[in-house]
Amino acid sequence: MKTLLLLTDFSTDGNHAAEYGYHLAKVLNADVVICNAVTIPAQLAEVGDIDWPLNGYDGVIDDSDEELKKLKKHFEHTDHSSGFHPQISTMNQAGRLADVVENVMNSCNADMMVMGTHRKGISHFLLDNNCRNMINSTTCPLLLIPPHTPFRDFGKIAFATNFEYPQQDILDICNLISLASVFGSDILMTRVHLALPQSVDHQLMANELLTGVIHKANYPNIFYRSVENEDTRTGLDLFCEDEQIGLLVMVHRPHDFIDVILRGSHTQKMAARITIPLLVLPDGNKS
């Protein structure tokens, strides 16, 4: 990876995610662009702890510039480690976050976006409006960082799949290897299903997918895990907790895991146990 785009609204959680992204960039030998979308007053209610200044629009842009400079200096002055130091750029624009990101992406060609969430748990932070909008519009990998998540090796990476698009799963996992190999992480292809006896077809699909990935990727640390649970969200939650997963990876497809969570009527009831990063991959099957 060459460039990470770090999105922040200058809240505590937003700046924490930006710092997480900076540490990740150091490990990946990537440069960073810190980006702030300057919102209009009606949007500020969704952000939380940012006040609309009295000096109006120009003042907001100036304040954003100053906050970006402070964040850049913070990263530069607190990074006393030897080794790679990312080059830091800053950008801001007025408008909706998704629109600003699209404009910035056209100029910086980032390989991954990093964004903070204001809630813990998969179901909870997928309800955050900014997160929902970014998930629906992203054209590159989007890494969502829950509050207070410390930066550390991922250890085990869970790739959630339902076998509906096996060839695309193989490509996505192969692309994921460049990230996993940096940490020496295991990649666990994970399917949540009803507590019913495993069919021959199910096991055949699992074997074919695993064989296809291993053959194409030449990465030995790829395994398959079958999770029995009547609810996909709860099953993933419990699996990540029990297996001590360091990163959960999902592909955003219509009617797939994330879409179910975003639309599901029972989303609010899902236990907020997960406090690990979620990497959302765009749908490679889109035309």
Image: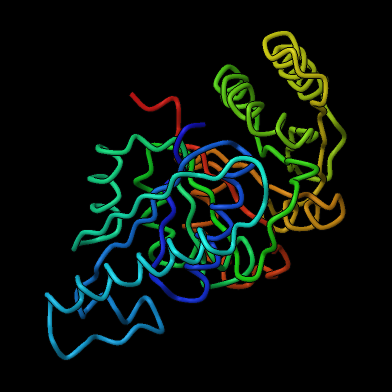
Relative height, residue 166 to residue 152 (above, below): above
Looking at the picture, tell me which residue is in the foreground, 54 or 97.
54
Total tally of numbered discs in the picture: 0
Q: Is residue 111 left or right of residue 249?
A: left
The x, y position of residue 116, in whole percent, is: 51, 63
Q: Quadrant of residue 202?
A: top right
Q: Quadrant of residue 34?
A: bottom left
Q: Is residue 216 left or right of residue 57?
A: right
- At a point 73% along the width and 8% down the height, the residue shown is 215
The x, y position of residue 209, in whole percent, is: 71, 18
Relative height, residue 53 to residue 19 (above, below): below
The x, y position of residue 121, in whole percent, is: 64, 66
Q: Residue furthest top?
A: 215
- At a point 70% along the width and 54% down the height, the residue shown is 231
Quadrant placement of the C terminus: top left
Q: Quadrant of residue 192?
A: top right
Looking at the picture, tell me which residue is in the foreground, 268 or 211.
211
Q: Residue furthest bottom?
A: 54
- At a point 60% along the width and 25% down the height, the residue shown is 169
Relative height, residue 191 to residue 207 (above, below): below
